[in-house]
Image (spheres, rainbow, N blue to C red):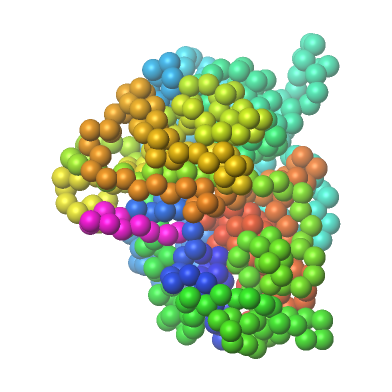
Amino acid sequence: MSGLAAAARLATLGHRVTVCEASGTYGGMVGRYERDGFAFDTGPTLLTLPAVYRDLALKSGREPLEELVRLGPVEPESRHLFPDGTDLVLANASRGGVAQALDAAFGAGSGERWGAVTNRGRAVWEATRRPLLEEPLPDDPTPLHTDPYPAPPRRGLARLARPTRTLADVAERELGGHPGLTALLQEHALRFGLDPREAPAGATVLPYMEQSFGVWYVQGGLRALADAIHLRCEQRGVEFRFDTSVTEVLTENGRACGVVAGGERLPADLVLSSMDHRELYERGIAPGPPPTTTREPAWGRFSVLLALRGPRPAGTPFRTVVHARDNALELDALTDHPDLPRHPTVQVHRPDDPSLVPDADHEAVTLTVTVPEADELAELAPDFDTYADHLLEHLAGAGLDLRERVEWRELLTPDVLGPHTPPSLAGAGGRFLAPAGRSPLPGLHLIGATVHPGGGLARAGMSASITATVIGPA
C-alpha cells in the first residue's frame, strides 16, 4: 500500500513512475481471499486515521476519498467478552460513551481511570504526532528515546518505586491492576504485536487515537481501498509490472541508478523500496549495510477464515474481542515458552457487508490470534488445524459458538501472513523506533511498514507522503 500511495503522489508531482511488483497483484498485505461467493480481507480489515487516505485522494486527484470508496464509521467500535462473563460494548469515537460503558461493566470510577490514561495518551500524541507520523525521522532521534508519557505524581512509598516505564506499569499503577481494564490495555498491545511488559507507557497513544478519531470500514473490505488507489495510479500514468521481482538495485558513482527486475535492467533517477528493509539487504538486493535498528522481531499472526451457514445476526458488532482466560499465560506462550497460546485473546471480525457473502443466508467471519514468530513456531511444527478447532471451542466457552454453522474454513498461518509490524513509539531508549526512510545509498528511499513511521495502514500511507514530500516535484 505504501508503494501504491507513493506512486500516486509522485506521478501527480510529474514523475514518470514504474512499479515492479513480485506478486501477480497490487496491495501487498491488503489482500483478498475469495471462494464460493465468499470474500475475506487477508490483512487489515478496519481503517484508523482515514485522514491519511483522504489527503492522498485529494492530493492525487482532487476527489474526496468518499467518492472513491464507500467509507463509514463502525458502530459500535467493539464488543469485549471477558473470562468472568462480563460483556462490554464500546462506542466508536466517543470517549464519554466509553467511560459510561466501563463504569457499567466494571464499577463506578473505572471509566474515569481509563479516561485519565487515555488523556495522558493524548499528551503523547501531541508530543510525537509530527516527528513520528508526519515528518522524516530526525537525523538525531535521541530526543525520541525518552518517553513523553506524563505519569501522574506518586505519593507515599510509591515515590520509592521505579518510574512508570511500560504499559504493564500503567495497568498496575494507574488502572489499579483491574483485570478487565488490564485486558483492554493488553489487547491493544497484542493487536500491534507489542509486549505490554516491554512496550513504553507512551503506547497508550494507541487507544487514545482509536477512541478519538474512530474506526472506519470500507464497503467491500479494505481491498476496495487498494483497488481505488491502484486505479488512481493508472489514471496518473503509472506503469505496473506484475510478477516482476527486483533482484538488484543498480548503482553508479555511489548512488542508485535503477534496478534489475524480471531479468531486465530498468534505469531510474530514484528508487523506492517498499519491501521489508531487512530482506532488501539480507538478500543482497541493495548494497551496503542495512539501516541500524534496535527493533526486535515481532510476533506472528494466525487467522481462520470462516464461511458460515445462516445469516449474520441483527445487531452483531463488526469486531468482538474474546479475551484470554489468563493474560500472564498468554504472554508466557508468546515469549518465555513459545507455543500456540491456549485460550488466547481472539479478534473476531464480522463485517455487515453483502458484497462479501454469496447471499443473505451466509456470513463471512475472520478470527485472528497473535502467536510467536514464524521461525520459533516452525521448530515446534504445530498442528494449525487442531488449533483452529481449539479456537472455536474457546469462543464457544465465551458464549460465541459458531461451530455448527461452519460450511468451510481456510487457515492463514504465520509464514503466510508474516509478522506484526508495530508502529514507531518514543521511549525505551529508541528500541521501538523503526529505522529512517533515508537509505545509506543516495537515490534509494525506503518506505513501508518496516521503516519510519512504522506499521499499520495509516503509517504505510504516511511513509509514502513523507517520502514524496522529500523528493518533491519532478
- Closer to the camera in the image, 243 or 231: 243
Residue nearest the viewer, comparing 15 with 377: 377
**Residue 460 placement: quadrant:** bottom right
* Magenta residues, dominant SS class: strand
x, y percent for residue 357: 23, 52
Query: Is any part of residue 172 visible from this angle?
Result: yes
Q: Residue at x 43, y 44 (%)?
A: 303
Identify whether 150 is placed above or below 50.
above
Name the outermost residue toward the top.
Answer: 156
Percent position (x, y) of residue 370? 52, 39
Residue at 55% across / 65% down in the picture?
Answer: 2
Residue drawn at x 36%, y 33% as measured from the top left: 389
In magenta segment, residue 121: no
Q: How many marks?
A: 0
Quarter of the C terminus within the rendering: bottom right
Does residue 347 appear to the left or right of 133 in the view shown? left
Q: Quadrant of residue 198?
A: top right
Q: Nearer the viewer, residue 461 or 448?
A: 448
Residue 124, x across and y down, in percent: 67, 41
Relative horizontal placement of residue 163, taking residue 271 as reference (left or right): right
Where does the image place residue 96, in percent across and percent down from the top left?
A: 46, 31
Q: Is residue 259 left or right of residue 382?
A: right
Q: Is residue 341 above or below residue 132?
A: above
Q: Is residue 118 visible?
A: no
The answer to whether residue 36 is magenta is: yes
Segment tinted magenta in the rendering: 30-39
The residue at 28%/33% (across/down) is 402
